Amino acid sequence: MAQPILGHGSLQPASAAGLASLELDSSLDQYVQICIFKIIVIGNSKVGKTCLTFRFCGGTFPDKTEATIGVDFREKTVEIEGEKIKVQVWDTAGQERFRKSMVEHYYRNVHAVVFVYDVTKMTSFTNLKMWIQECNGHAVPPLVPKVLVGNKCDLREQIQVPSNLALKFADAHNMLLFETSAKDPKESQNVESIFMCLACRLKAQKSLLYRDADRQQGKVQKLEFPREANSKTSCPC
Ligand SMILES: Nc1nc2c(ncn2[C@@H]2O[C@H](COP(=O)(O)OP(=O)(O)OP(=O)(O)O)[C@@H](O)[C@H]2O)c(=O)[nH]1
């Protein structure tokens, strides 16, 4: 599995009055390392990948979206058990012509994968097999956490993918299933929990990794996720 990326905290703008404290903060800031988790969002075009990432990172539903070309990055810093974690969300293109030159980059050093389908479009669900194959074809280790998201649940009258079918599929592929809506503000907590669940799992894996490395070497040197880590970790959400 890819190692968590360690990055430096960034400076925030400040007023002139706060300059002294900013200088103090900035001198400290360069020593504060933040863990960054790369989470990619994959699925057919128009299933709502952009809207879900907007909802999680910005808390809003965009009025208008255009087809993603290549990839768009969004970020959100979250705090888990007192540690600040930067969740870096890669909103990938669903259309083949906008993604083919980028696919290698999507999967390189990925920490977690979110597969999205549209509950009102059966083809977006049946195509999940193809998306999973693509993911496996890029040697994403089995330990990389993956979740399944059925989006657009607000369109109750138009649902084509029954929950029990989706649950069966998720079970068969060892994934958690979330059914939600990027559009419905009442669902924003649910959207948040998709990404927080992954971040919690990744943090748990990272803690194991540090503990193992500490035990073996007295200090952290080479960071690799232990093969058996999966059995020891569970989603705390
Ligand atoms: N009703 C409803 N519409 C949604 C929801 N999420 C997204 N949409 C709409 O679905 C359309 C496609 O949304 P996008 O987020 O752009 O889809 P995408 O998967 O990023 O599409 P590509 O960039 O082409 O891969 C837009 O018109 C959105 O307004 C939702 O939860 N409910």
Image (tube, rainbow, N blue to C red):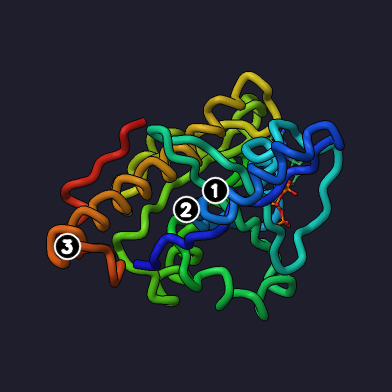
Residue 141 in sight here: yes
Quadrant location of the N terminus in the rendered image: bottom left
User: Could you say where residue 209 lies in the image, as x and y percent from the top left?
Assistant: 25, 57
Estimate the spatial distance between the alpha carbons at disc 1 and disc 3, rounded to whole Å: 27 Å
Q: Is residue 168 left or right of residue 162?
A: left
Q: Which residue lies at the image location 69% right of the left edge and 64% below the top edge?
A: 71
> Tag on residue 35?
2
Q: Is residue 75 depicted above or below 219 in this figure?
A: above
- Secondary element at image label 3: loop
Mark 1 residue element: strand
Q: Is residue 59 above or below residue 207?
A: above
Horizontal side, residue 163 vs residue 27: left or right: left
**Residue 158, quarter of picture:** top right
Please state the quadrant of the image where ligand 1 appears. top right
Q: Nearer the viewer, residue 157 or 36?
A: 36
Could you tell me residue 83's position as x and y percent?
A: 43, 39
Q: CA distance from mark 1 to mark 2?
A: 6 Å
The residue depicted at 65 percent of the width and 26 percent of the height is 154
The image quarter containing residue 188 is top right
The CB of the residue at mark 1 lies under 8 Å from ligand 1: no
For marks 3 and 2, the one nearer the N-term is 2
Residue 175 place in picture, x, y as percent: 35, 47
- Can you identify the residue that label 1 sits on? 86
- Mark 2 lies within 8 Å of ligand 1 (Cβ measured): no
- Kindly report the distance in space between the C-alpha atoms of the residues bearing marks 3 and 2: 21 Å
Residue marked by disc 3: 218
Number of the label disc, if any, that sits on residue 118: none
Left or right side of 117 for 93? right
Tag 1 and tag 2, C-beta contact below 8 Å: yes
